[in-house]
């Protein structure tokens, strides 16, 4: 039986459903995946009830299929997101978000003396620990730990 | 190394280190050559420096190159609020190579990605100072005749001292044994200790000087800076515990040499200066040859 929450946002014929996004971060996901520029139909649900997250967000994008590395960009903000690939109203494939090797322009470097906090430089990190999520700044070489990660 | 910026000591491989050491030895034999004839090198010092700036400029001048630049940002358009990016984009048009020191961490890496010419990092805040590290390696090679299997004591501020961290990384290729001597508050950070453990390199930590310095081949001293302590009483307690005095050197090995990146305040007593084991002023001179080696290899002249 389908979850009730699924029914609150209209189904799509072909495309991608990103489910289990933390409710407050739905628009961050929209911006990271640049969905505001997309031409096809996008439906967004926010503050839907979720057993796992309490409330959650969901985004359905018609006729759009992401590459794994595009999806991985949301790893820092929605690590538990589930990606369903829809064809003919059916889920044909499920994907999960994987933590990428490099994070560009999403997180802030926690070092107040880092150049990225002085000039408009796109931040860039190497993920040095994928399990615990610790990021090494490409510029100042300092480590930002998961608990200190601030999303830009 | 040709056309490649030198920002962090990890930008170079072991082979690169050895090549720089070899070239520096050549320059020590003949420091005056006309290799940089017609070259313009920008020295941008956004923050004051004595040794680094003057040894770079001396290195360039002795090779017949020309230097443009500034010794403090007060005399540049930075004063008017110009961004680093704009300054670097502009200066890169005027020169063949940029040497820069800047107080902001990561500024050198950023500059190297903005500039069309190579950049040498002459210190970016507390982050990296790779040319210092290479001159330390050269000094070790020169005084010991080798880099392998040495016993190295590092003393002072091991937490914030960028020179000790870089030297630790660079020496890790040569099977060293390390002794770290510092106040509790300024201990070697865990990430570096973990790095050594993963490589199977031996290290020992001490809070005071004891017999172990008799085994040292190199004693590398750094300054314990007052501003690192939030509690001034803590500083008063430790400030005299890490001063190297001449009478402490009696039982040290004959090949042992004392290095210090300078400036020194009081961590090496002036009575050590006359001791043949004091090497820090010659170390500063080595900076000229090493920088000649770095500049000429980046410009593809060697």
Image (tube, rainbow, N blue to C red):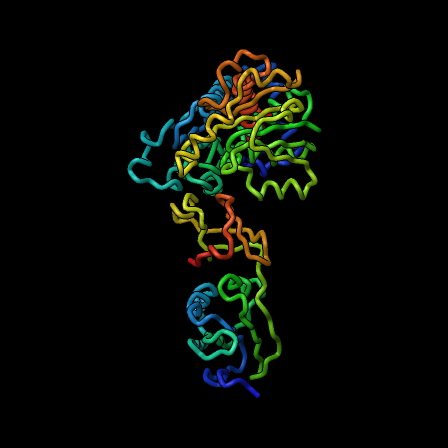
Residue shown at the point (64%, 32%) measured from the top left: B178
* Res B116 visible: no
Residue shown at the point (41%, 26%) measured from the top left: B68
Q: Nearer the viewer, residue B74 or A16?
A: B74
Image quarter hosting the C terminus of chain B? top right
Q: Nearer the viewer, residue A91 or B205?
A: B205
Image quarter hosting the N terminus of chain B? top right
Q: Is residue B210 above or below residue A113?
A: above
Q: Quadrant of residue B289?
A: top right
Tell me where residue B299 appears, x and y as whole percent.
Answer: 55, 29
Tell me where residue A118 appears, x and y as whole percent.
Answer: 38, 45
Q: Residue furthest top?
A: B274
Tell me where residue B2 appears, x and y as whole percent.
Answer: 58, 33
Q: Is residue B183 above or below residue B146?
A: below
Tell me where residue B263 appears, x and y as whole percent.
Answer: 46, 23
Q: Is residue B62 above or below residue B177?
A: above
Q: In screen coordinates, is B139 left or right of A11?
A: right
Residue shown at the point (56%, 28%) measured from the top left: B294
């Amino acid at each position: 039986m389908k979850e009730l929450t699924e029914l609150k946002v209209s189904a799509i014929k072909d495309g991608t459903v990103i489910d289990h996004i933390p409710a407050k971060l739905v628009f961050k996901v929209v911006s990271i995946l640049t969905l505001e520029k997309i031409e096809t139909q996008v439906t967004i649900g926010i503050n839907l009830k979720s057993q796992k997250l309490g409330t959650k967000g969901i985004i359905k994008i018609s006729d759009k299929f992401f590459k794994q590395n595009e999806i991985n960009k949301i790893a820092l903000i929605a690590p538990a997101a589930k990606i369903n690939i829809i064809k003919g109203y059916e889920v044909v494939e499920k994907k999960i978000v994987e933590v990428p090797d490099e994070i560009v322009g999403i997180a802030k470097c926690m070092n107040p003396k880092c150049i990225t906090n002085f000039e408009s430089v796109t931040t860039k990190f190497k993920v040095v620990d994928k399990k615990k999520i610790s990021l090494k700044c490409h510029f100042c070489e300092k480590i930002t730990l998961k608990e200190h990660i601030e999303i830009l | 190394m040709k056309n490649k910026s030198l920002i962090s000591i990890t930008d170079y491989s072991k082979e690169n280190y050895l090549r720089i050491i070899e070239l520096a030895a050549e320059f020590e034999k003949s420091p005056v050559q006309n290799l940089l004839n017609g070259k313009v090198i920008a020295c941008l010092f956004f923050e004051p420096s004595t040794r680094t700036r003057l040894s770079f400029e001396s290195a360039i001048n002795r090779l017949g190159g020309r230097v443009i630049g500034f010794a403090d940002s007060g005399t540049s358009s930075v004063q008017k609020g110009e961004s680093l990016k704009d300054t670097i984009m502009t200066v890169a048009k005027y020169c063949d190579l940029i040497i820069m020191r800047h107080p902001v961490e990561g500024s050198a890496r950023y500059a190297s990605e903005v500039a069309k010419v190579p950049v040498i990092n002459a210190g970016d805040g507390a982050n990296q100072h790779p040319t210092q590290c290479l001159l330390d390696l050269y000094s070790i090679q020169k005084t010991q005749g080798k880099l392998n299997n040495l016993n190295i004591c590092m003393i002072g501020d091991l937490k914030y001292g960028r020179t000790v961290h870089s030297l630790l990384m660079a020496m890790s290729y040569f099977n060293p044994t390390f002794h770290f001597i510092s106040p509790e508050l300024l201990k070697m950070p865990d990430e570096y200790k973990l790095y050594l453990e993963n490589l199977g390199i031996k290290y020992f930590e001490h809070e005071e000087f004891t017999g172990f310095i008799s085994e040292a081949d190199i004693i590398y001293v750094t300054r314990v800076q007052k501003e690192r302590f939030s509690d001034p009483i803590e500083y008063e307690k430790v400030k005299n515990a890490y001063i190297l005095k001449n009478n402490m050197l009696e039982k040290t090995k004959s090949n042992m040499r004392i290095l210090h990146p300078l400036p020194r305040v009081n961590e090496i007593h002036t009575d050590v200066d006359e001791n043949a084991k004091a090497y820090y002023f010659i170390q500063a001179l080595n900076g000229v040859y090493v920088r000649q080696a770095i500049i000429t290899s980046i410009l593809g002249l060697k």
